[in-house]
Amino acid sequence: MPPQERDRLPVPALTVGGLELDPDRSEVRTRGAPVSLTRKEFAVFWSLVADRGRVTTRSALLRRVWGREIDANPRTVDVYIRRLRSKLEQTTGCRIETVVNVGYKLVLPQP
């Protein structure tokens, strides 16, 4: 196991809006059923959940998820948002709203 993973403290799972998010496994579950996400998709979703109720800018998502990893174009975020929408909206009831010229806002289903 790489040192950065071995030395990392576990982050507790989070339950919000009927969803269970496990950051150590990069896993989302709805009503006990897993939703298949890649690690990057999970990281983008985790950031949106952390900012739930507020708009998250593309630059904030790039900084949080990709960091210095790549010289990413802000449109990279758009691709991941499109993937998340297709995987999450029908199965979980979550909506990711576009706030034109600003970023994205997560709207969780009402329990």
Image (cartoon, rainbow, N blue to C red):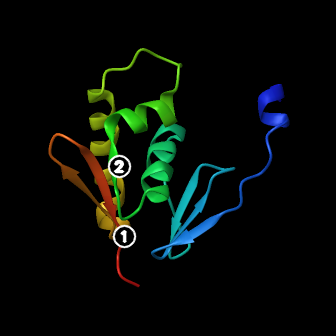
As displayed, is residue 37 above or below residue 14?
above
- Which residue is found at the position 77% from the left and 34% from the top? 5
How many marks on residues?
A: 2
**In the image as oriented, which residue stretches furthest toward the bottom?**
111
Name of the residue lying farthest toward the left = 100
Is the residue 63 above or below the residue 53 in the image? above
| SS label for mark 1 | loop
Left or right of residue 81, residue 60 in this image = right
Choose the circle earlier in sequence order: 2 or 1.
Answer: 2
Horizontal and vertical percent for residue 69? 53, 19
89 vs 111, nearest the viewer: 111
Going by the numbered disc 2, the residue's amino acid type is Leu
Where's the N terminus, which quadrant?
A: top right
Q: Residue at x 45, y 75 (%)?
A: 17
Q: Residue at x 84, y 35 (%)?
A: 6
Residue at image mark 2: 84
Q: Amino acid at mark 1?
A: Leu
Q: Indicate left or right for 95 with 61 as reference.
A: left
Q: Secondary structure at mark 2?
A: helix
Instruction: Give the answer, above or below, for where 78 lies relative to 71.
Output: below
Neighbour tally class for label 2: few under 14, some 14-19, many 20 plus, Cα within 10 Å = many
Q: Nearer the viewer, residue 62 or 2?
A: 62
- Which residue corresponds to the image point at 80% horizontal and 46% vertical from the top-left? 9
Q: Are marks 2 and 1 in contact (CB under 8 Å)?
A: no
Q: Position of residue 14 (x, y in %)?
A: 61, 66
x%, y% of residue 61?
41, 38
Q: Quadrant of residue 15?
A: bottom right
- Rounded to the nearest whole Å, what is the CA distance between mark 2 and mark 1? 13 Å
Which numbered tag is attached to residue 108?
Answer: 1
For the C terminus, which image quadrant? bottom left
